[in-house]
Image (tube, rainbow, N blue to C red):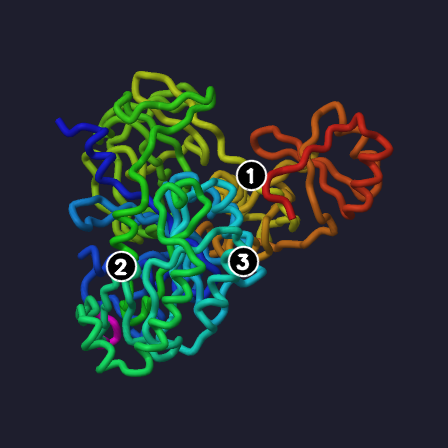
Amino acid sequence: MPSPIGEAARRRTFAIISHPDAGKTTLTEKFLLYGGALSAEAGAVKAREGRRSATSDWMALEQQRGISITSTVLQFPYRDHVVNLLDTPGHRDFSEDTYRVLAAADAAVMVLDAAKGIEPQTLKLFEVCRARNLPLLSFINKWDRPGREHLELLDEIEKQIGLVCAPVCWPVGIAGDFRGVIDRRNGDYIRFTRTARGATVAAEELVPADRAAVEEGAVWDDAHAELDFVNGVMPEFDRDEFLSGSQTPVFFGSALTNFGVRLLLDAVIDYVPSPPPRIDVEGTERPLDAAMSGFVFKVQANMNPAHRDRIAFIRVCSGMFERGMVLTHGRTGKPFATKYAHTVFGQERATVEEAFPGDVVGLVNATDVCVGDTLYFEDPVEFPKLPSFAPEYFAVARVRDTGRFKQFRKAINQLDEEGVVQVLRDADLGDQAPVLAAVGPMQFDVAQWRLEHEFGAPTELRRTTYKLARRTDAASAPVLRAMRGVDVLAKSDGTLLALFESPYWLDRVQADQPELLLERLIAEG
């Protein structure tokens, strides 16, 4: 029987984060190409008419808008390892979903556009990664197009993200005239050759330095002069510093042309740690070879409209998962059968017979399972809950056709359990007019689209004047409800949130009545 410890050592589980249009989805596709999990169709994923859409962007709304708005899980082999790639939403409005995905990852790859660098409106995504203390690899993408100076980009990473940059390779040729890279670790010059539409692995030629100097000319001289400067002011890669979250190895490349993709994927295998023991709510490590356990970091309904099912994605934390085993659902104490266990590859799915720490298993028809729940076999354990983000946008939802109220109520509950939006209810109104709370306004677009197209419940959303929320309690609620510009609503788990129209009014209430419970929520502002 396979050893959970030995199998875990072969696993690399990481997420990809970026701002929109930095090339994250393209890079995801190219990783699959290099891992042999995607055919030669994998070219530019902003596709020509008639081509299939990106593997990781399965939702119709994603395909319409050309951005990732949900997270997906993709598994493929590479260099005798099993790679679990967690693709995250590419917009800050979905940073709460990104946080949940990062809870299941052991490291992250940050993709930056060579022309844009770190954009202020998406800095929150990177801060989410830092908040989880995940090791971070940086990939400066689109070096085949005009862009900014490389040293300027590295300086921006250090100043805005707070990480020490350790370039692993250095580009030969400025942004827009990309020839290849010098591997800083051994001095090798790797020259790339374009392939038709990036549909196959890019040919790489190892060129001796003396020949490169003749063939590349001034471009080679410039790259070496820059590299001499970099060697004097920037450290070499240090894995301990990387694992501590203080240093990021930096790679230059072009996902579109496949330049530098192999170097980055090799670094994932060589640098990203294998799954470590998970810490439970008591602060104790759950040994990798303990009985099977895992936690749910994502719930998704209707991934395949033909099935109309609901899948709970569980990150295996310990032991060996075997299809058919009966787990215990920690929150309810009820048995949970795993007959329908799948690996999910975009919209495609296949039955999984076994899985090990670091792997992600999709449990089909997990009707009672919610994000943050723990599942275990025999030996009880509970992993920490995944916190909710502080909502900053609020809208009252009403079904347009009262004859579709049953579908509306079911859909609202489903979106709440998935974490698409937070659903707040007034005790007197219940599901008649719930308040949807979101980190960003695009979450409302997704909720409204899904209510109509997946659940057949066209819905009107009316934005409210509330601006922020605080956690409160039953003792404080009556006092707060009596105030102007304040309301108190309940989440599905019973948590009470006080909604305020103005931060200034909140400050005054806290100053005048400090006995009222008004706790901040995670990742606010």
Residue found 47% across the figure and 48% down from its top: 98
What is the three-letter code of the residue carrying label 3? Thr
Give the label, 3 or 2, closer to the camera.
Answer: 2
Q: Which of 468 and 102 lies nearest the eye of the viewer?
A: 102
Q: Which of 431 and 131 lies nearest the eye of the viewer?
A: 131
Q: Residues within 10 Å of mark 1 (few under 14, many from 20)?
A: some
Q: Is residue 407 visible?
A: no
Where does residue 31 sit, x and y in percent of width and height? 27, 58
Query: What residue did someone put label 1 on?
Result: 388
Is 123 a magenta residue? no
Residues at marks 3 and 2 touching, judged by CB atoms closer than 8 Å: no
Q: Is residue 499 visible?
A: yes
Residues rendered magenta in the picture: 194-199
Query: What residue did someone put label 2 on?
Result: 263
Is 197 a magenta residue? yes
Q: Residues within 10 Å of mark 3 (few under 14, many from 20)?
A: some
Sequence-first disc among 3 and 2:
3
Residue found 54% across the figure and 63% down from its top: 119
Label 3 sits on a secondary structure element that is: helix
Label 2 sits on a secondary structure element that is: helix
**Left or right of 350, for residue 438:** right
Query: What residue did someone put label 3 on?
Result: 122
What is the three-letter code of the residue carrying label 2? Leu
Q: How far is mark 2 from mark 1, CA to CA?
A: 36 Å
Give the label, 1 or 3, closer to the camera.
Answer: 3
What is the three-letter code of the residue carrying label 1? Ser
